[in-house]
Amino acid sequence: MVKDLFERIKSDKGPLGKWADKAEGYYVFPKLEGPISNRMMFNGKTVVTWSINDYLGLANHPDVLKVDGESAAKDGMAYPMGARMMSGHTKYHEQLERECAEFVGKEASYLVNFGYQGMVSAIDALVSKDDIIVYDMDTHACIIDGVRLHAGKRFVYRHNDIESCEKNLKRATKMAEKTGGGILLVSEGVFGMRGEQGRLREIVALKEKYNFRLLVDDAHGFGTLGEGGRGTGFEQGVQDGIDVYFATFAKSMAGIGAFFAGDKDVVQYLQYNMRSQMFAKSLPMPMVKGALKRLDMIRTMPELKDKLWEITNALQSGLKEAGFDLGTTQTCITPVYLKGDIPEAMAMVHDLRENHGVFCSIVVYPVIPKGMIILRLIPTARHTIEDVNETIKAFTAIREKLENGTYKKIAEAIMTA
């Protein structure tokens, strides 16, 4: 007997989906309103907003809005129509690719419409069934999905553990000798959940012992780390050792789109083999012209990155002084680690938003282990020291209620109501 496909879906909504009735619209799929800034509207109240990846505060910068608006009025959101390979190619796309490549110190770059889609497709294009993938276990979901498409072998190493990385490189080398293939190692420049930098310097050093190519997802490092915001490779002095560099426009650039950069022949290969781009509409002109403006501002306005780090340092040092555990973050991403279950986390975040006016992302199982809560803060150049002080005061108050059992009692009452 063949089961109805939807029978499982109706009975098992998944580890997050089972909370949908109680969480949707507030804890997940929340509606922040008003201009993107350090303070926005949520549920009818003004809140300090720490959940927007607008690191450099460009989203509503007057110069950015001017370029975006002028291009939208002149070009429209549809132009250019069609995939770039067939009919959607322009001199502005080429200009942006040249400038991105130059900025990150590579020969060439290739624009993609979305970072997630692009990473999945790039991994698929770069490896054949005979090749081996080695990757960090905490890499972003887009990398995991790209690895899943791989028809060959793959080995995962413990997060940021170079001993484990080398062990799996040895395994991959033995396997590649049998298959006749090569090895692709994938890491993030900045791990977006915990804020740790990938150990790129140590990984690149392993090239002296093993023959592999390195792909780095630097979505959170681009614009925030390294000389002039050129990324984690520059921060660690190993940009030349990164064979394929990836960054998105959705974080520091406050836009849409992404790019891959590397040697010209590798980039050209991606252009002609990435299915998600060959068969997808070209990046719209306002996004392209807007990205050119944003990149120019990153190059010429170092004060944006300086302000970001002023706020980051104040936030992180203040939280540590107040006794909070921030893990091993080495970047702007500020995770605050607490202990509790999902209902407690929901009660705590409700209190934080409604009574203290602070909005940040909440991370729970299955993203992290059971019994752990992460409140994840993303500082930006738009935030103020006043925002920082208010937030530390609020976090101190909610931690006390979490530890004395107040939120557990509230959660139990809600769950049994």
Image (cartoon, helix red, strand yellow):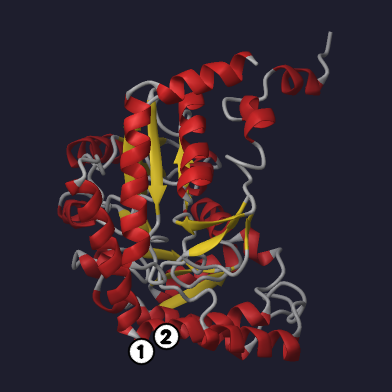
Q: Tell how many labels.
A: 2
Crowd class of label 2 (few under 14; some 14 to 19; many from 20; radius 10 Å): some
Quadrant position of residue 323: top left
Seen in the picture, residue 186 relative to 99 is either above or below; the reply is above
Disc 2 and disc 1 in contact, CB within 8 angstroms:
yes
Q: Is residue 131 left or right of residue 13?
A: left
Query: Residue 129 location, x and y as percent?
Result: 50, 43
Residue at numbered disc 1: 300
Q: Amino acid at mark 1?
A: Thr
Residue under the point 66% across and 66% down: 278
Asked whether 373 or 169 is in front, the reply is 373
Asked whether 417 or 158 is in front, the reply is 417
Q: Is residue 266 left or right of residue 331?
A: right
Q: CA distance from mark 2 to mark 1?
A: 5 Å
Q: Is residue 243 at least partly visible in the picture?
A: no
User: In this view, which residue lies farthest toward the top?
Assistant: 1
Q: Is residue 217 left or right of residue 11?
A: left
On residue 297, which mark appears? 2
Crowd class of label 1 (few under 14; some 14 to 19; many from 20; radius 10 Å): few
In which quadrant of the rendered image does the N terminus lie?
Answer: top right
Query: Residue 293 location, x and y as percent?
Result: 50, 86
Residue under the point 65% across and 87% down: 90
Q: Mark 2 falls on what kind of element?
A: helix
Q: Mark 1 falls on what kind of element?
A: helix
Quadrant position of residue 77: bottom right
